[in-house]
């Protein structure tokens, strides 16, 4: 429970309309943070998440954002600035969670430039430029969390580009931490293992799900809340000296 004497901290969660991002947004709201979440194609789901937080006594707003279109980011920053002012009487926020991501399974021999570019735009380029554009609004002492993947560490056929981009994102995490350390902004990445969401079309048939589950020492697929609860717990000064780290949340997968 947030200390009522302190102004609430504010987090922006991209891709907060479903899956892991939804869980991060809801659990951040439960911890007393103000939440700006984004959706891309599913406005109804995004607004429903904001409503759920507002109904349980929190404060949340849903905005549309396609993280694959960096030309739209200046406009998004303007919208965020207006909302911060209107809703929280602030012109800054505290935490950015770059969660929005896409996968498209494709063996190397079948991967087209179009697939490659789509994956790059959302999973790496979008994160870089959105963070760059939002950093002037993040308070000194704030934090960025980039949602990576276990596939940045281990290889599964069909995930070459996605896995390489998530590894790139972990590289960016360290570089952002280095350049923004002077503003005491921490930058970390959280790498989920196999989480049971609709991501990339879901986890497939029972046999495939069983195989993935047995790859984790805990012997099961993760749920969105397994990651959401952890990320929300990092959105406080309790993690104040954790910086430039990759933290895997995967039940001990592929160890
Ligand atoms: N699930 C897993 O097993 C797993 C494992 C490792 C890492 N991850 C990572 O965890 C993150 C979240 O995955 P998830 O499982 O929660 O996926 P999900 O259930 O498919 O949800 C994806 C979210 O991202 C949004 N999104 C998709 N394309 C977007 C775009 N171009 N611009 C902005 N937002 C976009 C979606 O919004 P709309 O629905 O409104 O379009 C949705 O809110 C991703 O970065 C993924 O790489 C997932």
Image: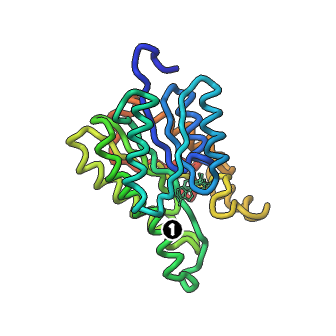
* Residue extending farthest left: 182
Element at badge 1? helix
Colour theme: rainbow
* Residue extending farthest bottom: 109
Q: From the viewer's perspective, tell me whether residue 10 is left or right of residue 108.
A: left
Q: From the viewer's perspective, tell me whether residue 15 is left or right of residue 203.
A: left
Of residues 242 and 168, the one drawn nearer to the viewer in this rendering: 168
Q: Percent from the top left, x then y, of residue 125?
A: 40, 64
Q: Residue at x 69, y 50 (%)?
A: 220
Q: Residues within 10 Å of mark 1 (few under 14, many from 20)?
A: many
Give the labeled residue for mark 1. 162
Q: Residue at x 57, y 34 (%)?
A: 27
Q: Percent from the top left, x then y, of residue 44?
A: 67, 47
Q: Residue at x 43, y 44 (%)?
A: 79
Q: From the viewer's perspective, tell me whether residue 250 is left or right of residue 120.
A: right
Of residues 212 and 230, the one drawn nearer to the viewer in this rendering: 230
Q: Residue at x 55, y 38 (%)?
A: 25
Count how many numbered circles sit on residues in the image: 1
Residue 197, placed above or below residue 104: above
* Residue extending farthest top: 5
Q: Percent from the top left, x then y, of residue 198?
A: 68, 56
In the rendered image, which quarter contains the C terminus? bottom right
Of residues 178 and 117, the one drawn nearer to the viewer in this rendering: 117
Image quarter where ligand 1 lies: bottom right
Residue 8, placed above or below residue 46: above
Does the Cβ of the disc 1 residue fall within 8 Å of ligand 1? Answer: yes
Q: Percent from the top left, x then y, of residue 36?
A: 49, 39
Of residues 157 and 106, the one drawn nearer to the viewer in this rendering: 106
């Amino acid at each position: 429970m947030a200390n009522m004497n302190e102004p609430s901290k504010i987090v922006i969660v991209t891709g907060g309309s479903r899956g892991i991002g939804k869980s991060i947004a809801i659990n951040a709201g439960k911890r007393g943070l103000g939440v700006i979440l984004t959706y891309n194609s599913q406005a109804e789901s995004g607004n429903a998440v904001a409503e759920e937080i507002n109904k349980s006594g929190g404060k949340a707003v849903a905005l549309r954002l396609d993280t694959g279109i960096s030309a739209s980011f200046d406009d998004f920053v303007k919208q965020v600035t207006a909302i911060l002012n209107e809703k929280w009487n602030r012109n800054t926020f505290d935490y950015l969670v770059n969660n929005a991501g896409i996968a498209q399974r494709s063996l190397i021999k079948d991967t087209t430039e179009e697939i490659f570019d789509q994956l790059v735009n959302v999973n790496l380029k979008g994160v870089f430029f959105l963070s760059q554009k939002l950093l002037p609004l993040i308070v000194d002492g704030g934090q960025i969390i980039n949602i990576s993947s276990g596939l940045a560490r281990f290889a599964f056929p069909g995930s070459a580009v996605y896995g390489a981009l998530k590894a790139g994102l972990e590289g960016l995490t360290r570089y952002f931490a280095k350049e923004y350390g002077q503003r005491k902004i921490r930058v970390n990445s959280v790498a989920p293992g196999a989480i049971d969401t609709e991501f990339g079309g879901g986890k497939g048939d029972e046999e495939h799900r069983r195989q993935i589950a047995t790859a984790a020492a805990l012997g099961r697929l993760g749920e969105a809340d397994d990651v959401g609860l952890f990320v929300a717990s990092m959105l406080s000064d309790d993690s104040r000296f954790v910086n430039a780290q990759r933290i895997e949340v995967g039940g001990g997968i592929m160890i």
